Amino acid sequence: MSSFIYLGNFSSILPYGKILKFVETAKWQQACSSKTEHTKNTRPVDEQEQSYFYNEWNSSRFEVTVKDQNFFSPEWFKVLGAKNVDYQAKIYKTLPGNTEPPHIDFFPSFIGHTDEEGNLHSSEYIAEQSKKIIRAWIPLGDSELGHLLFSPDQVISKWVKGNVWELVGGKTHGFVNAGRKPRFVLVFTGWRS
């Protein structure tokens, strides 16, 4: 199975004008997951080890939570096949020269880092739970030079505003802005209906 599944063009379903207006005045929070997330002992060893090479100068992004902005209509949930409960949504801004290193999404905000006894979840458990969750990758503009979403088996470098992909759970992926302009993407995560 591919790491990214093209879901279609959602330009008639998502309120891009409203979303882009929000982006103009968003209260961004800077983040560097290779320092705050990938170094945790709950992450795969290769992610922990590669964190040595990534820092706030080459692996930084800005994010803002947008669940409270009502960007998602009932039609969105129906077409996506997601429940309209307990979902998350964030917009990410990545400036030129920054990379989100290869990593696996395992949805700790949905399933937690550990089981009830405090043990790390097994990769089998994470893979099973990931099948119940859908994560949509929603670029907020047309592709630009140097904007890439990558995995071991796929690279997406061309898109138009409205295109939406599923980021398949349990698959290694990352992104790069090796271009000249900021990259904005909305990421929706929810339970499958």
Image (tube, rainbow, N blue to C red):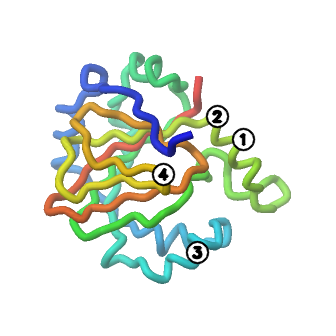
59 above or below 157? Answer: below
Determine the CA span between mark 2 and mark 3. 26 Å
Judge from the rendering whether residue 128 lies leftward or rightward of residue 54; answer left or right: right
User: Residue 56: x and y, percent?
Assistant: 35, 76
Going by the numbered disc 3, the residue's amino acid type is Gln
Q: Amino acid at mark 1?
A: Glu
Name the residue beneath numbered marker 2: 132
Q: Secondary structure at mark 3?
A: helix
Task: Tell me how far mark 1 sits from mark 2, CA to CA.
Answer: 7 Å
Badge 4 vs badge 2, beta-carbon distance below 8 Å: no
Dot 1 alpha-carbon crowd within 10 angstroms: few under 14, some 14 to 19, many 20 or more: few
Q: Residue at x 19, y 40 (%)?
A: 20
- Give the spatial CA distance, label 1 vs label 3: 23 Å
**Residue at 29% from the left image edge and 42% from the top image edge:** 139
Task: Report the mark closest to the observer, 4 or 2.
Answer: 4
- Height in image: 54 above or below 168? below
Amino acid beneath label 2: Lys
Q: Provide residue 15's location: percent of width, then percent of height.
A: 25, 27
Locate the N terminus by quadrant: top right
Q: Which residue is mark 1?
A: 128
Q: Nearer the viewer, residue 42 or 169?
A: 169
